[in-house]
Image (cartoon, helix red, strand yellow):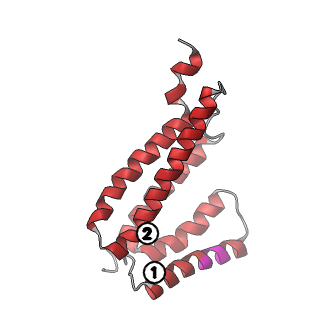
Amino acid sequence: MPQSRKSRLTRPETLTAFGIVVVSAGFLIPTFELRAISALLPAAMLIGLIVLSVLLLVYDQRKAANGEESQPMTQSPRRVIGAFLLIVTYALATDFIGFYVSTVTTIPLVAWLFGYRSPVGLAIATVIVVGIIWAIFDFGMSQEFPAGRFWGH
């Protein structure tokens, strides 16, 4: 059996695409139990992830069919693992200290760890992202984000 056929489904981008589709579909199921207005954003983002992952899968399989060698997903696996740990920490922090406090600390931290070092730029990006989220959801749609277990609901 040729090497390209043997490794076609174990290519890093293919495995990543499969993983994202499975995890996103798993998270999509609970959104059906939410009110429509509350489920709108998470469902739209999860469906978007699924669509983009399917496109990645098709693109990578076309490359495999043409005999192109797969490239490593990253040249810095520690950075990817660190980003994953930051996401898990962010989710836990949102549960315990609330959405806004967690987001205000996580946005500049992630940008700093990925190499963006301008304190003014970090502050501006944080204010813009959190401000837009607040304006759309809290002000515009009257939706409250979790305040965290420490501060109450």
Residue holding disc 1: 137
Residue at image location 49% in from the left, 54% down from the top: 49
Q: Which mark is residue 41?
A: 2
The mark total stands at 2
Residue depicted at x 60% and y 33%:
62
Type of amino acid at the residue the image marks with label 2: Leu
Q: Which mark is residue 67?
A: none
Where does the magenta region start and end? 123-128
How much space separates mark 1 and mark 2, taking CA atoms? 10 Å
Q: Secondary structure at mark 2?
A: helix
Instruction: Name the foreground residue: 2 vs 126.
Output: 2
Q: Where in the figure is residue 130, as x and y percent of width and height?
A: 54, 77
Location of residue 91 (image quadrant): bottom left
| Residue type, numbered disc 1 | Phe
Is 132 on the left-hand or right-hand side of 112? left
Residue 143 or residue 94, whichever sits in front: 143
Assess whether mark 2 and mark 1 are in contact (beta carbons under 8 angstroms): yes
Label 2 Cα crowd, 10 Å radius (few <14 / some 14-19 / many 20+): few
Q: Dot 1, how many residues are within 10 Å of its Cα: few (below 14), some (14-19), or many (20+)?
A: some
Which of pointers 1 and 2 lies earlier in the amino acid sequence? 2
Q: Secondary structure at mark 1?
A: helix
User: Where 96 falls versus 8 (above or below)?
Assistant: below
Q: Residue at x 37, y 51 (%)?
A: 25
Q: Position of residue 144 (x, y in %)?
A: 38, 81
